Image: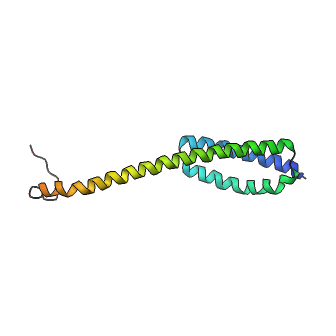
Amino acid sequence: METPIQQCKRLLLALEDLVVQESLLITEGAYDEVVRVIERAAPLVARVVDLAPAADGAARQQAVALIAQRTRNQERLAVQLARTKEDLRETQLSWNRVALIAPAYRGAHAGNISGRLFAQG
């Protein structure tokens, strides 16, 4: 039978693997997979928290290191989210500009365009 400290150390190793996967997936931009890894880690985190009173110094240090890496991962995700929001904002502004000038171009060629594309030789 596994003791609480043994179980805690085993779960911390599993969490460490998931945090490494999370880091790699963030680097690759595989955000759907990042969500899956976070979801897989949640029950492990909950169990480690339950076992925390039994943890020794080494296990606590490992947990602190994992928390630090997760914090860095979250910061990287926040930066990427901010970039994506800015890209979306710029795209929306571009669409708005196109919507404003498109009627002028449609009106100028309305008599020549029958709704179909054609080539002139």
Image point (64%, 51%), residue name: 37
Q: Quadrant of residue 21?
A: top right
Give the colour scheme of this rendering. Answer: rainbow
- Give the image location of residue 121, x and y in percent: 8, 43
Q: Is residue 40 left or right of residue 3?
A: left
Residue 115 seen in the current view: yes
Left or right position of 21 against 120: right
User: In the image, what residue occupies the spot 40% across and 52% down?
Assistant: 89
Camera-nearest residue between 18 and 103: 103
Residue at 86 percent across and 43 percent down: it is 57
User: Foreground residue, 83 or 11?
Assistant: 83
- The percent position of residue 9, horizontal first and vertical second, equals 82, 46
Relative to 9, 84 lies left or right = left
Quarter of the image where one finds residue 72: top right
Task: Give percent across and percent down for residue 45.
Answer: 74, 54
How many discs mark residues in the rendered view?
Answer: 0
Q: Does residue 116 appear anywhere in the picture? A: no
Identify which residue is drawn at 38% across, 49% down. Answer: 90
Residue 44 locus on image (x, y percent):
74, 54
